Amino acid sequence: MYQGKLLTKAYRVKWASHEDASCPLCGEGEETTEHLMIECLVSKRIWLRIMVAIELPVICSSMEELWQVDKSLCTHWDKSARAKISQILNPAVTWAIWLARNHLVFRDTPVYEENIWESVENFVKVWGLSCIGVKRVAFIRERLYVKE
């Protein structure tokens, strides 16, 4: 990120007006940070899977709402392993979406929701074990299980 912004197509179009600003993942809207991470149909399905995995019936409609949910999870789960994991869920999802987008844009690699989901699972597991010290992280039948 540069000055709080991702180098999305909409951001780049300001300097290179010949470029198409549509979202490469869904092709529907202008590729802004908000669209790419929240409004895009592909991203929405990933966020829905995360909300199901943590058993939270919330769908966010903006980045601000997403970070507010993240903060409330940390408070709600207090110092538990789930609270620790909640600290890496948003970064894991946004990083997986951004990587998939970059692979499509720069390598012409097709984007599949399942591949993004697998990346999210892997990031959560690796970061959970190495960065925040939980003993076990697993997604079983798309539910998140954490052990301290």
Image (cartoon, rainbow, N blue to C red):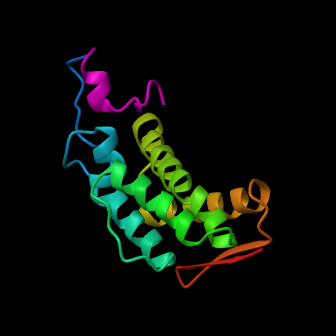
**Residue at the farthest bottom position:** 141
Image quarter where the C terminus lies is: bottom right
Nearest the camera: 59 or 117? Answer: 59
Find residue 55 and report its horizontal and vertical position in percent.
47, 80
Q: Dividing the picture into quarters, in which one does residue 19 lie? A: top left
From the viewer's perspective, is 88 left or right of 43?
right
Q: Please tell me whether residue 16 belongs to the stretch shown in magenta.
A: no
**Res 89 → quadrant:** bottom right
Which residue lies at the image location 34% right of the left edge and 40% below the top edge? 33
Residue positioned 28% across, 59% down in the render: 41
Q: Is residue 22 visible?
A: yes
Q: Which residue is depicted at the point 30% across and 52% down?
A: 62
Q: Residue at x 47, y 69 (%)?
A: 50
The magenta segment is 1-15
Image position, residue 114 (x, y; %): 47, 67
Up/down of 98 relative to 114, above or below: above
Of 146 and 113, nearer the camera is 146
- Dominant secondary-structure state across the stretch colored magenta: loop
The verdict on residue 10 being magenta is: yes
The residue lying furthest to the top in this view is 15
Residue 97 on image: x %, y %: 45, 50
Name the one closer to the observer, 59 or 7: 59
Figure check: 20 above or below 86 = above
- Would residue 111 be visible to someone looking at this image? no
